[in-house]
Image (spheres, rainbow, N blue to C red):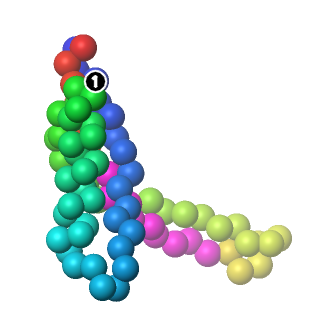
């Protein structure tokens, strides 16, 4: 049986850093999980709709958030 682990990924960088910094941080995450026996599968963009009912229905709104998720697996 295969077990999966899904981890949220947010690369916090400064304005002076480049996309190379983002890639390096992702590489560190992947290597960390690989050292624990997990195999990298993919990076997925995940969309979530958030309903904010407001106060007594006033200013109720719906917004969309996007997340990056890193998927790992390993054989049990």
| Observer-nearest of 46 and 12 | 12
Q: Quadrant of the N terminus?
A: top left
With respect to residue 3, does 22 lie above or below?
A: below
Q: Please provide percent x and percent y for residue 23.
A: 19, 63
SS type, badge 1? strand
Magenta residues, start to end: 61-69
Name which residue lies at 20% across and 74% down.
19
Work out whether residue 11 can be spotted. yes
Name which residue lies at 27% across and 79% down.
17
Which residue, as the protein is rendered here, is positioned at the far right?
A: 56
Q: Which corner quadrant of the image does residue 20 belong to? A: bottom left
Name which residue lies at 17% across and 41% down.
41
- Write down the residue under mark 1: 3
Q: Residues within 10 Å of mark 1 (few under 14, many from 20)?
A: few
User: Magenta: predominant secondary structure element?
Assistant: strand
Horizontal relation, residue 31 to residue 6: left or right: left
Q: Please provide percent x and percent y for residue 29.
A: 28, 48
With respect to residue 62, does 35 lie above or below?
A: above
Name which residue lies at 65% across and 67% down.
52
Q: Please provide percent x and percent y for residue 14.
A: 37, 79
Q: How many marks?
A: 1
With respect to residue 57, does 15 lie above or below?
A: below
Work out whether residue 46 can be spotted. no
Which residue, as the protein is rendered here, is positioned at the far bottom?
A: 15
Horizontal relation, residue 50 to residue 76: left or right: right
Question: Is residue 58 inside the magenta stretch?
Answer: no
Q: Please provide percent x and percent y for residue 74.
A: 21, 25
Q: Which corner quadrant of the image does residue 2 belong to? A: top left
Q: Quadrant of the C terminus?
A: top left
């Amino acid at each position: 049986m295969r077990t999966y682990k899904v981890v949220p990924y947010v690369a916090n960088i400064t304005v002076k850093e480049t996309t190379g910094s983002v890639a390096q941080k992702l590489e560190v995450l992947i290597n960390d999980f690989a050292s624990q026996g997990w195999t990298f599968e993919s990076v997925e963009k995940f969309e979530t709709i958030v309903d904010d009912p407001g106060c007594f229905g006033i200013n109720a709104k719906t917004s969309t958030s996007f997340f990056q998720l890193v998927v790992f697996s390993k054989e049990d």
